[in-house]
Image: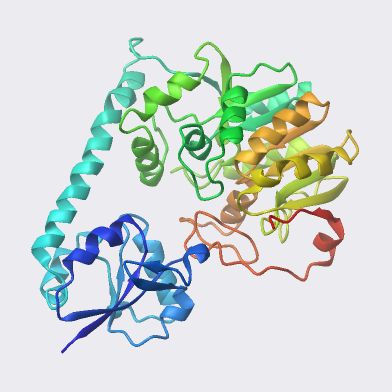
């Protein structure tokens, strides 16, 4: 009897796993959270949304991802899939191998598992010397100088400085690798390389404080940056930095999710909120970002207006976005959440006499804090790039205040 399978995930893991299925199986379709893949094809099979796929005739859903499968499993259960129909090959659940033999070549699967374990171990070993060196206070390894997020707050409040942040996504773009928000753009790459070593008097540059010890950080955080620095990634980033420059901690906008001890999160958010207390603010964000909507993140501001741009590929419309901001009062504090575009925009606005802060992530972090989330979960009505299902957001929301605040909408097409 033929076993019918739905495959969740149309990426590298699925490409490897597809060779493990037995001849007596039938792949019904692939499903994926990335709406850009829907109705396209992967390995000659159609890619559907999870909501559409689960209405097909299938026996099992195979979660074909190397990481984050727990969140996907919970997502599937929330939309009505029975847990006993969900198979997670890369979870190393050896007790289920006898059941899986009717549709999987277990020997091939074990080979893939070992390959993944070795790769993860390699990432850990490659970064281990840097983690140990900082703990042992040895001065034989070089680190960028990164001042704390509290120091960044002081510079912004007391000296009215602007801030551009660099995360792993920005460094990927500088190295010619696209991310989920922005494809590689030669002009953007050039600007990011310019800004990361810049020294404007009214502007600070923030980079991730993740080059040494990972104290009080979650395993997910550690794995992310160990992999990021793997295969010479650290050396490539160092080559783009000014190692004599004073940077600030880019995790100023991520005070909650990635910490093991979250007891100081409330205090951190209170300090961060002081950056815009009593200010007239201009929010520049993606169309579905909706910072502060449904919470009190900006309740302490004097007034708020919004300029909306594309939720992805925003740099394609950079000139229009900049022009729109320049039509606003120079005395307003500009808060930007727009991926790598925000990094550039905050810098250019600082040069033009505006105070602008690249604060992407802060609203979603605040939402996760308010609901005591232990994982990256979707937030209703808001584009959450990092959570399974978080990109499937309605085009418009019924919120009178939010809609009244919008003064310009810049579409990608």
Give the position of the N terminus as an image quadrant: bottom left
Left or right, 317 with reference to 30: right
In this view, 303 is above or below 64 = above
Q: Nearer the viewer, residue 148 or 45?
A: 45
Q: Nearer the viewer, residue 366 or 173?
A: 173
| Residue 212 in view (yes/no) | no
Left or right, 205 with reference to 11: right
| Residue 266 in view (yes/no) | yes
Q: State the residue at coordinates (8%, 62%).
A: 107
Q: Quadrant of residue 224?
A: top left
Q: In x, y percent, where is residue 34?
A: 48, 63
Q: In x, y percent, where is residue 371?
A: 57, 59
Q: State the residue at coordinates (34%, 36%).
A: 226
Left or right, 291 with reference to 404: left
In this view, 285 is above or below 326 = below
Q: In x, y percent, where is residue 236?
A: 41, 25
Q: In x, y percent, where is residue 48?
A: 44, 74
């Amino acid at each position: 009897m033929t076993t019918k399978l739905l495959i969740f995930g149309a990426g590298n893991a699925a490409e490897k796993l597809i060779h493990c299925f037995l001849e007596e199986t039938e792949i019904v379709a692939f499903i994926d959270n990335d709406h850009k893949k829907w109705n396209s094809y992967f390995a000659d099979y159609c890619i559907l949304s999870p909501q559409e796929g689960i209405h097909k005739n299938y026996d099992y859903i195979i979660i074909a991802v190397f990481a984050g499968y727990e969140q996907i499993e919970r997502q599937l259960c929330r939309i009505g899939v029975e847990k006993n129909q969900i198979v997670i090959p890369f979870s190393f659940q050896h007790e289920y191998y006898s059941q899986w033999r009717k549709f999987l070549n277990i020997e091939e699967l074990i080979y893939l598992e070992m390959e993944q374990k070795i790769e993860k171990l390699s990432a850990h070993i490659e970064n281990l010397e840097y983690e140990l060196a900082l703990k042992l206070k040895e001065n034989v390894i070089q680190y960028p100088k990164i001042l704390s997020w509290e120091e960044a707050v002081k510079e912004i409040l007391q000296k009215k400085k602007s801030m551009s942040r660099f995360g792993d996504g920005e460094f990927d773009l500088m190295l010619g690798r696209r991310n989920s928000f922005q494809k590689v753009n030669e002009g953007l790459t050039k600007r990011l390389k310019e800004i990361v070593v810049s020294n404007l008097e009214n502007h600070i540059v923030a980079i991730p404080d993740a080059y040494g010890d990972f104290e009080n950080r979650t395993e997910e955080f550690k794995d992310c940056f160990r992999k990021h620095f793997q295969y010479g990634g650290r050396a490539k980033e160092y080559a783009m930095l000014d190692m004599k420059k004073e940077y600030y901690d880019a995790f100023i906008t991520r005070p909650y999710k990635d910490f093991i001890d979250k007891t100081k999160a409330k205090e951190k958010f209170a300090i961060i909120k002081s950056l815009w207390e009593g200010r007239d603010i201009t929010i520049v964000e993606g169309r579905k970002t909706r910072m502060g909507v449904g919470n009190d993140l900006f309740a302490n501001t004097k007034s708020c207006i919004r300029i909306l741009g594309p939720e992805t590929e925003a740099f394609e419309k950079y000139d229009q976005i900049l022009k729109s901001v320049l039509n606003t009062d120079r005395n307003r504090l500009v808060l930007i959440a727009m991926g790598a575009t925000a990094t550039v925009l905050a810098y250019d606005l600082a040069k033009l006499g505006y105070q602008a802060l690249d604060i992407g992530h802060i609203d979603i972090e605040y939402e996760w804090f308010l609901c005591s989330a232990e994982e990256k979960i979707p937030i209703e009505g808001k584009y959450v790039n990092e959570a399974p299902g978080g990109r499937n957001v309605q085009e418009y929301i019924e919120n009178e205040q939010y809609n009244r605040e919008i003064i310009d909408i810049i579409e990608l097409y």
